[in-house]
Amino acid sequence: MGKDVKLAGWVHSSRDHGGVIFIDLRDRYGLTQIVFDPELNKETHAEAARLRREDVIAVSGRVRERKPGMENPKLSTGEIEVIVSKLEVLNKAETPPLEVDDRIEGNEEIRLKYRYIDLRRPIMQHRLGFRHSLITAAREYMNSHDFIEIETPLLVRATPEGARDYVVPSRTNPGKFFALPQSPQLYKQILMVSGCDRYYQIARCLRDEDLRADRQPEHTQIDLEMSFVHQEDVIQLVEGLYKHIVKRTLEIEIKDKFPRMTYSEAMQRFGSDKPDLRFGLELIDVTKTAKKSDFEVFRKAEFIKCLNPDKDFSRKEIDELTQFVADCGAKGLAWLKVTDKGLEGSLAKFFNAALQKELLDTARPKKGSTLFFIAGNFKIAHIVLGNLRNELAKRMGLIKPGEMKFLWVFDFPLFEWSEEGNAWQPCHHIFSSPREECLQYLEKDPSKVVGLLHDLVLNGLELGSGSIRINRKDVQERVMKVIGLSHEEANKRFGFLLEAFKYGAPPHGGMGLGVDRITALLCGFNDIREVMAFPKNKNAECPMDGCPSEISKEQLKELHLKVDVVKKS
């Protein structure tokens, strides 16, 4: 109170109350009410009357207490106001194409096109500040555990890591290209060979893949690697990191250890390798019982899994859910209703009384509820029903707002068979180490090879993925051979890593942890674009600056490139 101050910002709103003008001045720190009284300064008052929304101004004045009953408890500055003695109009603004108001959500394309206006909204300023606090907390934790922050290159050699590379033509080496890194994976392993035993980086990662709410062409991760460690060391460190982040950003202390689950258990119980533990609704294996029925689909299926949501569903709802599982890849959704008389529905006639009792004993449904069944191979029966589980949780309101359920998932298979490519491919990446006892199966039966892999999950979304890495040249070459890379091809693509392993590579492991995703989740939503300053739209375009864009003929000539693109009609 009584202090002379100078404030600068944007005109958020203006009100004329009987000659005295009240303006809410907005800056990164919030809103402050400033007052223009004609009795104090007529010239300044007259100039204030001409101000419009989003004009940029600076004012000098004195802080005073608001009159009794005029306080605004919703504002941190709600008990004071600034009586203005001097006004500077720094820039006039046209009427903005969207409202700088948290209560009004603009059209997505308009928000992205005029992102600099959208980011003025207090909620967006808060999210950017929250992200900063999260990264600051991460750095604080990593530094306190003797990690050093090291930057790895953005112009790298193209290597297959699961998604398409973004490539950059080299002007000085005609016909050759750099790639933008999908992750710092190979470089952080090289750093371990270099003796940098504890590395981390707030790393930019770029992947040319189809987009969705939790995927962008460029994202940020907390990338870390440690030498001379076991899997447990990495897990304990990362668990501590997330507890520290949550405490620093949300002021919530998590004391319990994060639960752990093998990949096999997660798939069997929840139909997902990233299960949401905020609700139950576990998958029920009814294969043994259902195969004894007269229903031909069940008799031929490899697996039959069931969900018991303890709720009665209308025929319209069942039709909607049938379409939902069809979109997920299932051929159909079988169902039965539980009544006082037993099981009812078109499927019931295929189950005799003894089988119906056996099914009821296994599923243990309440009377008046509906049971849902999916039959098929392992992926269809588990993954589709896992997706249905999540859909039912949303429809039934089983998820408590604000609840956080972390989970470690480990013991992933190292390889999976690709029907499309008719070949084995890595489940994560080819630098993950097999368990020692599984090395014998690399050539005999890759399906039996379990990797020293570990994923961290929060509320059904993967926060990060990691592993203990291969540090032996012979083992790395054997893994590469499983996925069809010849000795020559392996050396062509990864020769620098294999060469480094020859000179004494320590055991090492680490993780890549998504910054965008954990920021979004801790802010209470899934869409990572809401916590990124300048995200792309679903077509990987930026409406604000118009990228990607064409380049001039002169630039193409310098890069030794010719463009041959069929124009859209």
Image (cartoon, helix red, strand yellow):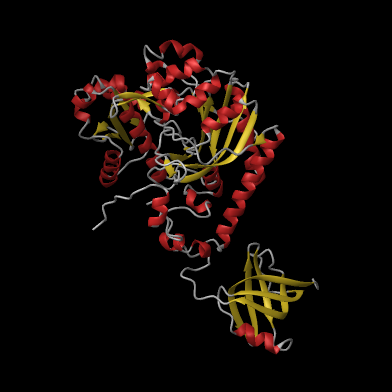
Which residue occupies 51% across, 26% down? Answer: 496
Choose top left, top right, bottom left or bottom right for residue 552.
Answer: bottom left
Q: Residue at x 39, y 40 (%)?
A: 175
Numbered-mark total: 0
Q: Where is residue 460 in the image (x, y as percent from the top left)?
A: 47, 37
Q: Along the line of sight, which residue is nearer the eye, 72 or 16?
A: 16
Q: Position of residue 102 (x, y in %)?
A: 53, 63
Q: Decide if residue 295 is in sight here.
A: no
Closest to the observer, 129 or 289: 129
375 and 496: which one is in front?
A: 496
Res. 192 visible in picture: yes
- In which quadrant of the rendered image does the N terminus lie? bottom right
Q: Is residue 396 left or right of residue 93?
A: left
310 relative to 409 in the view: left or right: left
Residue 136 vs 16, above or below: the answer is: above
Residue 207 falls in image quadrant: top left
Q: Which residue is drawn at 45% across and 18% down?
A: 477
